Amino acid sequence: MTGRAAGAPLNPSPDRPRLNGPRPNRPRLVRVPLVVLATAVAGVLAATWLTMTAPVPGIVEPGPLVEFGVAVARLLVELGATGALGMALVPTLVGAGRASDRAELFARADRLGMLAAVLWLGGALVTVLLQAAELRPGAPVTAGVVADYVRGFGSGQALLVSAAVAAVCALAFLAGSRVPSLLRAVLAAAGLIPIVLAGHASSGTTPWHAMMADLLVLHVIAAAAWTGGLVAILVLVAPRAALLAGALPRFSALAGACLITIALTGAFSATIELTTTPGVDLPGTLVRSDYVLILAAKTGCLLAVAAIGWRMRYRLLPAIARRHRTALIAWGMGEVALLGLAFGLAGALSRSPVIG
């Protein structure tokens, strides 16, 4: 009696190259981005609810659907650009390795980067519609209303520019290795700039506020590189021990630089807001302002993430270099959850008045 040997694959195909290295399981491909999304949405909804003002009699309000919808849609723009930036950084983080492992990994990163860019594009277009509705509460959102909003407000123009960059970024990921990964990373980072300048930095016209606009660009891009890079590591690189041992030290260095940038630029921006906004009475405002409460929660997230990052760098990284099993995924999931929450709080903070 003849038959296949025990354990031999069914219908082997000699013409199909065998992919080396373990594939990341599908639960991880979905679970890590969902954790970021869930915590970010929870953060932005809670902070938006906290900062909602009481309705004024005689003035038509846009309604909670529009108010919460704008916050969530703008958040999707930032998260989509963050995901695209993280996937564009994969070749830089991975560095050298077996060609077959790298090719499979980069192809997956390209697919995920394209999906992130599509999310970014959709979020930008939905935000345009919702902010047009916010401009004329109670009126139907027609093409004319949207056109008036885009023509009359820098935020609308910024969103369309960001949407255009998202579309180009999606096409760049679709083109694969024909477009350098560095160019894709630059596109993803550049798509955040008009949103930051039109949103976060529109509250003042003093020279200090002009400087704050530039620093907030660095603040947001650093947060996106850190979060996107970590998601890419956990989703794509963590299952491949040989690549992880080389990629994690590079990511650790990137995360450290991002942490310093976020802390310094955030502290400077908060100081300018609190010391130059008319009507702010320090230190009394520190205990009465919802803005300060959200800022304190965001700072707490940053400190907790820094503590997790310290453990990963000085406790887990040496073990991973020796190819030992570690709790990298568990600690990494905690870190992305906190980073997602910080993203949500930051999104609400950009729309929150200092006094309120």
Image: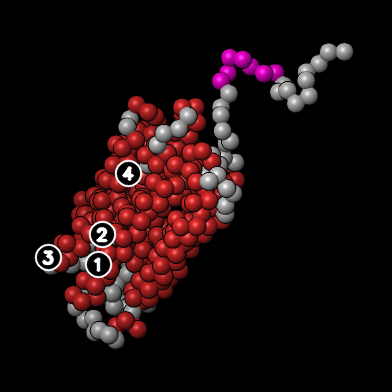
Residue 189 coordinates in the image, percent (x, y): 30, 46
Above/below status of 33 relative to 25: below
Instruction: Inspect the image, locate mark 4, and give the three-letter code of the amino acid beneath it.
Output: Ala
The residues bearing labels 3 and 2 have C-alpha atoms spaced at a distance of 14 Å
- Sequence-wise first label, 2 or 4: 4
**Do the residues bearing badges 3 and 2 touch, measured as CB atoms within 8 Å?**
no
- Give the residue displayed 35% in from the left and 59% down from the top: 259
Residue 145 coordinates in the image, percent (x, y): 28, 52
**Do the residues bearing badges 1 and 3 touch, measured as CB atoms within 8 Å?**
no
Which residue in the structure is indicated by mark 2? 216
Q: SS at mark 1?
A: helix
- Sequence-wise first label, 1 or 3: 3
Which residue in the structure is indicated by mark 4? 188
Bounds of the magenta span? 11-17
Residue 164 in the figure: left or right of residue 332? left
Which residue in the structure is indicated by mark 3? 207
**Observer-nearest of 1 and 311:** 311
